[in-house]
Image: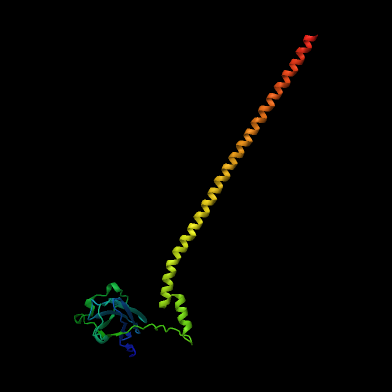
């Protein structure tokens, strides 16, 4: 893989790098950046052009680099639907720069400042575009045991091999049956507990009725005995009166 083109030092701006390298991937936006360095004591205005303006987005495409400072420019390639033949790209970029008045701002930069009619001393630097293949992740290598059989056994247990697929399918069939049996046993247990509670409630009601009857009998027997005693006393008293 060729190394990126080194930076160039012009009279106005130092541009790094001179080659825009995009790790090409289909249907994906890809960005790279370049740095503009102003090594002078002047205000430098710049403008970035490309041969494929619909294919690339440049931010910022115009601007001002202050004295003894830098400016980063991000170039974004739109998502591509097809891979170019042999990963070759003929697109080019052009960076134009001029000495601008002191105190100039980005809003003051216009396209007319970079025309021949403006009579400004303009410097132009061309940049080329290169597509590179994206880094490939390392392919996983299956680990094999010395005898070979333990790895197959682990595949079978984990459900990775053919036998493991059968085991997994068998487990998927057995698990619902076990769950249904557990649910049936739970329902039977709850039903038995319910019936037992009903029977106990019925017994308690019967015992309560017996207790109530016993209490009623005792109260009824006590009342008649008192009446008998009173009647006997009255009879004795009347007999005594009659004798006297």
Residue located at (47% from left, 76% from top): 157
Residue 174 vs residue 113: left or right? right
Residue located at (32% from left, 78% from top): 31
Q: Quadrant of the C terminus?
A: top right
Q: How many marks are shown on the rendered structure?
A: 0
Residue 218 vs residue 195: left or right? right
Residue located at (45% from left, 63% from top): 177
Q: Is residue 208 visible?
A: yes
Whole-percent x, y for residue 164 in the image: 43, 75
Whole-percent x, y for residue 89 in the image: 25, 85
Q: Quadrant of the N terminus?
A: bottom left
Q: Quadrant of residue 73?
A: bottom left
Q: Nearer the viewer, residue 112 or 174?
A: 174
Whole-percent x, y for residue 214 in the image: 65, 33
Whole-percent x, y for residue 118 in the image: 21, 80
**Residue farthest left in this picture:** 117
Q: Is residue 126 visible?
A: no
Residue 148 vs residue 117: left or right? right
Q: Is residue 237 above or below residue 143?
A: above
Q: Is residue 107 above or below residue 218?
A: below
């Amino acid at each position: 893989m060729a190394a990126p083109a080194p930076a160039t030092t012009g009279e106005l701006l130092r541009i790094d790098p001179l080659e825009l390298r995009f790790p090409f991937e289909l249907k994906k936006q890809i960005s790279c950046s370049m740095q503009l360095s102003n090594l002078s004591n002047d205000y430098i205005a710049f403008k970035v052009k490309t041969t494929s303006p619909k294919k690339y987005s440049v931010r910022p495409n115009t601007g001002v680099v202050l004295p003894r400072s830098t400016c980063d420019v991000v170039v974004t390639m739109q998502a591509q639907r097809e891979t170019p033949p042999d990963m070759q790209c003929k697109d080019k970029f052009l960076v134009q720069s001029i000495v601008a008045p002191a105190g100039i701002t980005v809003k003051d930069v216009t396209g007319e400042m970079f025309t021949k009619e403006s009579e400004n001393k303009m410097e132009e630097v061309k940049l080329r575009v290169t597509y590179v293949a994206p880094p490939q992740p390392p392919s996983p290598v299956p680990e094999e045991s010395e005898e070979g059989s333990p790895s197959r056994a682990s595949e079978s247990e984990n459900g990775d091999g053919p036998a493991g697929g059968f085991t997994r399918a068998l487990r998927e069939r057995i698990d619902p049956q076990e769950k249904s049996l557990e649910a049936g046993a739970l329902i039977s247990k709850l039903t038995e507990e319910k019936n037992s509670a009903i029977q106990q409630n019925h017994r308690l009601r019967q015992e309560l009725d017996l207790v109530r009857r016993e209490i009623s009998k005792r109260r009824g027997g006590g009342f008649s005995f008192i009446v008998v005693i009173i009647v006997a006393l009255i009879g004795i008293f009347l007999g005594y009166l009659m004798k006297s």
